[in-house]
Every structure is written in C-alpha cells, then in structure tokens.
Amino acid sequence: MAEPQLDFEKTIAALEKKIGELKKLSSAELTPEIESLTARVAGMRNEMYQKLSAWQRVQLSRHPDRPYTLDYIGMLFTDFMELAGDRRFRDDKAVVGGFARFRGKPVMVIGIQKGRDMKSNLFRNFGWPNPEGYRKAMRLMRLAEKAGVPIITFIDTPGAYPGISSEERHVGEAIAVNLRDMFSLTVPVVSVIIGEGGSGGAIGLGVGNRVLIMENAYYSVITPEGCAAILWKDKKFAQTASEALQLTADRLLALGVVDAVIPEPLGGAHNDPAAAAAAVGTAIGESLNALARSTPEKLKVQRYQKFRKMGDFEERSIAETVATAGSAIAAEKPVEEDAAAKDAK
C-alpha cells in the first residue's frame, strides 16, 4: 500500500515519483534533470513546512503513520510492564500504562493509543477513551505515587468517547476526578502531546508539572470540526475554526498553555520516527531533571499555580462594570442618532 499523502503534500509527492521514475532509466543524460528536480523538491519542502497553516498542522497531527504512544514506549523505555483495568468496570484498550524504566530509572508511563487499521482502531476505540480509561489512568498514577516514581503521560486523542454508554458510566465525572486528583499528586508529572490534544479527553491526562507539545501536534478545547459544527453548523469551516482556536504549538507556547515545543523532523514525526523519539526523550529527560530537585509539596504548588495563572483576567466591581457599560452606550448614542437623522432625510 502506498504511503498516505496529505492534500498539501501531493505536489511534492508527484515530483518525487517523477524523480524515482527517471532514476530507474539509469541514463547519464538524465542526471542534470534529476539533480534539478531533487533540488527543487528540497526547496519546496523546506518552504512548505516552514509556513504550515493551523489546519495543515492538524492534518499532520492525524497522519496515520505518525508514532503513537506504544511506539514511543518501545523506543524510549525499557522493562515496560503493562497494567490493566480500572477495578470497577473493565479495561479500556484506548488507554495503556504501566511501570517502565526511562534511562535506567523507574517511572510510570501512561498514554492514549490509536490504531492504524480498521481492526486495531476498533480495538482501541479510535483513541477515544471511555470513563474506565481515565479511572485506570488515575489508579496507575496513585500507584506511582505510592512507589515514589515520576509519571509520564502521552496524549493523542480527539476527545473522550461521546457515546451513550460512556455518558451512562459518567465520563464527565471521571475526567473531573482526574483533574482534581492530579493536582494533589506528590510526584513529578510530565505530559507530552504527541498528536491530537482534543477537549477534556486530553486534559484528563494533561495536568502536569511540565506540559510539552510536539511541533505538529495541537491542543484545543474542541476539535476544529466540532467547533465548526457548533458555530457555523457546517464542518467545512474546520479550517477557519483551526485558525481561531489558537491550537498550534507556537501559539500555545506564547499563551503559556505549554512549557516547551519539541521539534520534529522535516515533514513530520512520521518521516523519521527515531529522530522524533530522540527529541521527545531529550525533552522528557530535561523536564524530569528539573523537577527532581522539588519537594512533594513544591510539586503540588507548582502544578496548581501553573494552571491557575493561565489566561488574562481583569476584575471589576459591579459599579465599575455598570459605569463602563453606560459609557459605551453613551458613546454609541450619537452615532445611532445620526443614522436615524439620515434615514429621516
């Protein structure tokens, strides 16, 4: 099966195919043309990936060949021992986790796992965790706290599963409990957004002392399609929504929502998974080293303050608000009168 191509990559893919066909001819006369096309493709690729739109980065975050949680666990961790079940209902295959070693030191690693084909996607519920997935994750975090080991979470989901069965088992409550209890953890927590970071489904594993995001991942209160369906009643406005949501890594860093952006190989993590994993490993290692010097109490306080200070707010008394609103109305009144006068004329 041919490698899936995103819409904006098709021009480059066509040129690369032509280069491959010319190389098969093995003619010395074609060497200059091959070199010229190769240089052209390299230039186009560099220019394209330096100017990606928010929607194009969303598409890259969903690339079917992009490394998933278990891929990173296999490349960065040793002695992984998966633990299953929430001890209440069942095991959610969309969430994986267990003890492992990171650079020789014990950790608890937890992440959301997608599938690559129909069979594995059905098995993993397309990366949509159910309530029991969040409860399993919290059980493992508490276990890590008892063991005194750091927690590393990998986030890659469009959101929590929105089906009736999920609602019947109280998915909103499960996420809310995770948010509450993660703030009280006394061990370091490093969260890494490796692909999609959608809605409460992402934040349910994302209350970390350090929140890292890969260059072509996104983090948002809702998917672009979901936002478009609500605001414009049409998913075709997803591209517009992705720009308005400020969901790209660079914007999130500027807004203080994430702590660092992990660079990806040119063209995305799927083009060189080993290099992408090395960058992720470096970022996690630096974060754990920085947090290792903090006491349990400082870790809790830092985690709370980190999320508490997000956003800019201005507090006003009721009187000030009324006065400001009155001034605004007064300022607009002459304009309205002028318009009315013009209509009368």
Image (cartoon, rainbow, N blue to C red):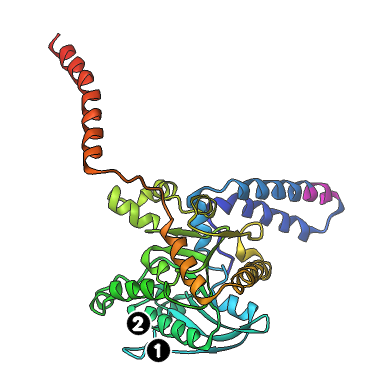
- What residue type is disc 1 on? Gly
Task: From the viewer's side, name the closer residue of 278 and 119.
Answer: 278
Residue 141: x percent and y percent?
46, 82
Residue under label 2: 132
Residue under the point 48% across and 89% down: 83
Residue at 32 percent of width and 46 percent of height: 315
The CA distance from mark 2 to mark 1 is 8 Å
Q: Nearer the viewer, residue 58 or 335?
A: 335
Bounds of the magenta segment: 29-35
Is 2 placed above or below 144 here?
above
Left or right, residue 308 beside residue 259: left
| Magenta run includes residue 338 | no
Q: Residue at x 26, y 76 (%)?
A: 170
Percent position of residue 159, x then y: 38, 67
Q: Residue furthest right?
A: 28
Label 2: element kind: helix
Quadrant of the rendered image containing residue 221:
bottom left
Are the residues flagged by discs 2 and 1 in contact, CB closer than 8 Å? yes
Q: Position of residue 329 (x, y in %)?
A: 21, 28
Which mark, by number, is residue 297? none
Q: Which residue is mark 1?
A: 85
Visible in this render: residue 193? no
